[in-house]
Image: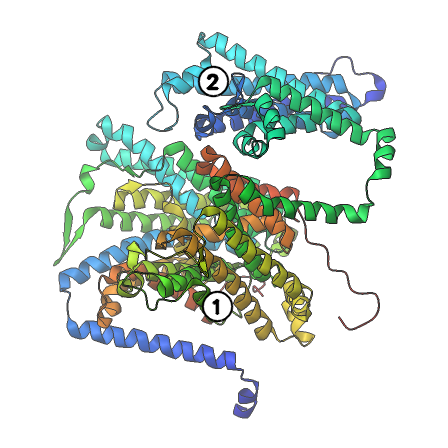
């Protein structure tokens, strides 16, 4: 049997094996070097992990949108990042009057709820609109047409936002309740980040309830598993698609609000590369797989945040944080090349060729 | 709620009421109104408000809004049902146009009374005042509604005209719009010699097209188009014109002659625009090999462009970062070879990745390269965010290619060489294997095509073309910065392929001229180019997936020889 396998081995396989070994070596030497140097204190690590979890939560929410759409339509929704951006802007435009009128300070929870509701509603609307205009006409078209229209839709949304709202970033108004730190045991973390992670987990729980407990959620799962059987069971795939885009869009809108709260700014180009990373997280966890998306999101966030400190330091690189995108994209490429089904496995009826 | 409900004659059937139900009219009007409002809110109106289409008569912004209403009417009257009842079509279109005008007016009034400038940055008071015509709210609404109705009705009328009348009218309008939009380009072209200069003075003034000039252009275009459609004139002209087969070739030869003559004939600005267009044509050829022929969507394409540019920079620059001090011509093959090697290295891991995943994987790889180039880690070698400056211009013997015109010819020469190579490759055994892989990888493999070799060759050769483009870019710009190598460049190249025609090399040229040349020539448009790209990509896939100059479909040879 070994002889058989050796005979079928090509030099490309050898190259890929060599690549795996190289990456493993890189990661381990780097990690060993960093830990030996012990440049960062426990406080630093707490901050890294906390920030990683916050970004991870945002990536997870984005990844959920990608994974749901891909599971049903086999389409990478490039415009999802822009839906996120639109949600963030909607939150901003709600936050400014709330803040200046003092409502945000007086009734913070109500204000937060209003912002969240607006962000989710607007984002869901935009997502449904994009599906109707840019994706539905091309659903039966093969080749690269759906992907190209997705990219086109993404750019249209991005630069419309630029045209409407201006090229400069806007500062998100301060929410007094979210300033300062929170001490949990021996650790001290920024309040905004803790709030974001908690809220994100709540949103994810809500999504889980929808998918598992409601009829529409069951329809979604059915269509993603076998579209034709679902049609035979009396499920209208178009309605399911619209619902999926709406829910995914709403979640992305929530993620937009959370991002705005963490980084305190919104700008028209914030969506595209975060969207790519969100897709990376979805693929990492397993496309079509909802728990996978959540896992992938948090993993990617943590990897991006602790990666530079954890193993790039070991190579003696100055300002390793500039290379955190390299870590994220390298993880994406590695997953796509070596394990396209992701960590928890794909949940698709027909595997992508 | 059917408008034409009451007096439907027995023969007309239920078709007329369905078209002219309130819902259809309302929907058309709302859509047009929303588009018009978008044009205003997204800053398009503001950007073009200063630019005259016809001097002292019509600004581009006004034309844009007017066009929206007219197109809405056109489309309304183009529905199948309208053929049965033309007058109702026009009336319905007019109503739809009125609705559109009302929607736009409502948005304008709302924006004016509740200061929305903090949300929509382009809603300045002068702009809003301009759209209200200095009248009371009710009056301005009425004006907009009336204008919308009139324009929409005009569009509908136009649609219902017989073909012989319609075509010349459209050609005439198109000619006026083109002459007005590209006034500076046309003026420059006309001023090159004394004969046409008089014409130029007649048609244009510094700011743009004169109304008399517009009338003249319209008249000439209409007459020309009418003659073309007129059978008697056709047969007469047909006797002196060459046969159909030759016509396409003559157009191509003429086009090439014009392009070659342009840098010298026009000014330096146009030469520079042509250089940029040429660079994108080069990159388009490269991506066309990867995507159009082999079917591999590579969004990390800009990385190869960067490799070519940085190689030339590192090998020829006068500064401290330079590795050697070669001439441009010595560095050029090295740049192409290194870019090809980069293509090889990129292609190797993603050989087994397909479709959407391939696009995202290559996007990731391209971004990795960009971040690395920008990073401080590689700053000692590559200059970080400050890039590499002081790159000398290429020289042939004692003659240095210093001015933009000369650089334009360098770019054109590179394009010609690349076009020849690409054409030869497309029609070779390699090209046929690429086409097979594009159609179906598994079947191609079953037929004995070595996927690895063929795909890697596609990446390598495509990357080499991009490297050539990068090398010329470095020579042209004199300095390379990481900011020139963003993902947007890859998207640019993809967009121009989509517009021109994936798989078609002539389409690459058309796409470049359209998507790269136009924003350079219409300065105000430059801000909205990516917006336009987005719309164009979706629209192209909807209307003409083959592109503006589609690739000829692959016909198997009939002689029975091995293909």
Q: Percent from the top left, x then y, of residue B62? A: 52, 21
Q: Percent from the top left, x then y, of residue B125? A: 37, 18
Where does label 1 land, which residue? B333
Which quadrant: the N terminus of chain A?
bottom right
With B517 as the anchor, is A20 left or right in this view? left
Task: Tell me which label, 2 or 1, sits earlier in the chain.
Answer: 2
What is the tally of numbered marks visible in this picture? 2
Q: What is the image's colouring?
A: rainbow
Callout 2: few (<14), some (14-19), or many (20+) C-alpha neighbours within 10 Å? some
Residue A80 appears in the picture as rendered: yes
Q: Which mark is residue B106?
A: 2
Chain at tag 2: B
User: Could you say which quadrant of the image residue A224 lies in?
Assistant: bottom right
With B468 as the anchor, is A54 left or right in this view? left
Residue at the front extreme, as displayed: B398
For the point 32% across and 78% down, the residue is: A25
Q: Nearer the viewer, residue B493 or B16?
A: B493
With A121 as the anchor, is B146 left or right in this view? right
Which quadrant: the C terminus of chain A?
bottom right
SS for dot 1: helix
Q: Nearer the viewer, residue B57 or A1?
A: B57
- Marks 2 and 1 belong to one chain: yes
For the point 52% across and 68% down, the residue is: B460
Above-or-below relation of A89 to B405: above
SS for dot 2: helix
Above-or-below relation of A162 to B372: above
Q: CA distance from mark 2 to mark 1?
A: 62 Å
Q: Nearer the viewer, residue B187 or A222?
A: B187
Residue B27 appears in the picture as rendered: no
Q: Nearer the viewer, residue A45 or B484?
A: B484
């Amino acid at each position: 049997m070994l002889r058989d396998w050796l005979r079928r081995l090509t030099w490309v396989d050898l190259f890929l094996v060599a690549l795996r070994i190289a990456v493993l070596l890189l990661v381990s030497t780097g990690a060993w070097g960093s830990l030996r140097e012990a440049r960062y204190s426990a406080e630093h690590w707490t901050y890294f992990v906390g920030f990683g979890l916050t970004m991870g939560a945002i990536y997870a929410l984005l990844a959920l949108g990608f994974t749901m759409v891909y599971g049903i339509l086999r389409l990478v929704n490039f415009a999802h990042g822009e839906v996120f951006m639109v949600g963030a802007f909607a939150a901003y435009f709600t936050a400014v009057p709330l803040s200046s009128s003092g409502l945000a300070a007086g009734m913070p929870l109500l204000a937060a709820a209003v912002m969240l509701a607006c962000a989710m509603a607007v984002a869901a609307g935009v997502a449904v609109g994009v599906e109707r205009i840019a994706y539905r006409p091309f659903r039966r078209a093969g080749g690269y047409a759906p992907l190209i229209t997705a990219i086109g839709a993404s750019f249209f949304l991005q630069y419309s936002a630029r045209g409407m709202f201006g090229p400069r970033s806007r500062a998100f108004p301060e929410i007094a309740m979210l300033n300062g730190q929170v001490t949990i045991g021996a650790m001290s973390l920024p309040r905004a980040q803790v709030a974001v992670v908690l809220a994100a987990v709540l949103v994810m729980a809500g999504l889980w309830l929808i998918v598992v407990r409601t009829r529409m959620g069951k329809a979604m799962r059915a269509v993603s598993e076998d579209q034709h059987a679902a049609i035979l069971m009396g499920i209208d795939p178009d309605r399911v698609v619209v619902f999926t885009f709406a829910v995914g869009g709403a979640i992305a809108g929530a993620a937009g609000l959370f991002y705005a709260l963490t980084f305190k700014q919104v700008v028209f180009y914030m969506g595209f590369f975060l969207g790519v990373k969100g897709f990376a997280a979805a693929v990492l966890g397993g496309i079509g797989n909802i728990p996978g998306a959540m896992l992938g999101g948090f993993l990617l966030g943590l990897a991006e945040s602790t990666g530079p400190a954890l193993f790039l330091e070991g190579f003696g690189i100055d300002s390793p944080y500039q290379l955190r995108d390299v870590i994220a994209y390298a993880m994406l490429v590695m997953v796509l090349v070596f394990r396209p089904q992701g960590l928890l496995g794909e949940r698709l009826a027909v595997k992508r060729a | 709620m059917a408008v034409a409900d009451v007096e439907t004659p027995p023969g007309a059937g239920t078709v007329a009421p369905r078209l002219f139900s309130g819902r259809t009219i309302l929907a058309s009007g709302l859509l047009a109104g929303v588009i018009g409002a978008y044009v205003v809110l997204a800053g398009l109106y503001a950007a073009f408000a200063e630019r005259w289409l016809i001097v002292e008569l019509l600004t581009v912004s006004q034309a844009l809004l007017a066009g929206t209403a007219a197109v809405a009417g056109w489309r309304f009257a183009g529905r199948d049902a309208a053929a049965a009842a033309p007058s109702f079509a026009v009336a319905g279109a007019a109503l739809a146009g009125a609705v559109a005008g009302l929607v736009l007016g409502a948005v304008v009034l709302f924006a004016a009374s509740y200061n929305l400038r903090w949300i929509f940055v382009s809603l300045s008071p002068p702009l809003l005042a301009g759209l209200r015509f200095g009248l009371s709210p009710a009056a301005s609404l009425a004006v907009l509604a009336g204008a919308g109705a009139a324009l929409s009705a005009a569009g509908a009328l136009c649609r219902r005209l017989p073909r012989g009348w319609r075509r010349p009218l459209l050609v005439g309008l198109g000619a006026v719009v083109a002459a007005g939009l590209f006034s500076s380009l046309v003026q420059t072209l006309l001023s090159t010699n004394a004969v046409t200069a008089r014409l130029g003075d007649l048609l244009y003034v510094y700011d743009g097209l004169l109304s008399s000039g517009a009338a003249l252009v319209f008249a000439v275009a209409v007459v020309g188009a009418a003659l073309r459609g007129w059978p008697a004139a056709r047969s007469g002209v047909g006797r002196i014109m060459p046969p159909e087969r030759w016509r396409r070739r003559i157009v191509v030869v003429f086009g090439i002659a014009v392009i070659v003559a342009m840098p010298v004939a026009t000014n330096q600005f146009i030469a520079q625009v042509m250089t940029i267009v040429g660079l994108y044509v080069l990159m388009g050829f490269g991506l066309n090999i990867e995507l159009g022929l082999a079917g591999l969507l590579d969004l990390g394409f800009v990385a190869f462009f960067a490799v070519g540019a940085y190689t030339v920079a590192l090998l020829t620059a006068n500064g401290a970062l330079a590795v050697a001090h070669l001439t441009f011509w010595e560095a050029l093959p090295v740049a192409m070879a290194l870019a090809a090697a980069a293509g090889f290295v990129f292609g190797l891991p993603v050989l087994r990745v397909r479709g959407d995943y391939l696009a995202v994987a290559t996007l990731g790889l391209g971004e990795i390269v960009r971040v690395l180039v920008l990073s401080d880690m590689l700053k000692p070698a590559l200059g970080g965010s400050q890039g590499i400056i002081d790159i000398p211009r290429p020289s042939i013997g004692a003659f240095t290619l210093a001015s933009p015109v000369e650089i334009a010819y360098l770019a054109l020469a590179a394009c010609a060489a690349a076009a020849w190579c690409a054409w030869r490759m497309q029609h070779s055994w390699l090209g046929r294997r690429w086409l097979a892989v594009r159609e179906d990888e598994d079947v191609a493999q079953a037929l004995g095509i070595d996927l690895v070799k063929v795909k890697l060759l596609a990446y390598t050769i495509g990357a080499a073309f991009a490297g050539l483009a990068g090398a010329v870019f470095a020579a042209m710009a004199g300095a390379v910065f990481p900011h020139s190598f963003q993902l947007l460049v890859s998207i640019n190249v993809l967009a121009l392929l989509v517009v021109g025609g994936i798989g078609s090399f002539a389409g690459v040229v058309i796409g470049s001229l359209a998507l790269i040349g136009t924003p350079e020539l219409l300065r105000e448009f430059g801000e909205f180019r990516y917006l336009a790209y987005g719309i164009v990509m979706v629209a192209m896939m909807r209307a003409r997936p083959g592109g503006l100059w589609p690739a000829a479909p692959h016909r198997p040879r009939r002689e029975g020889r091995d293909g």
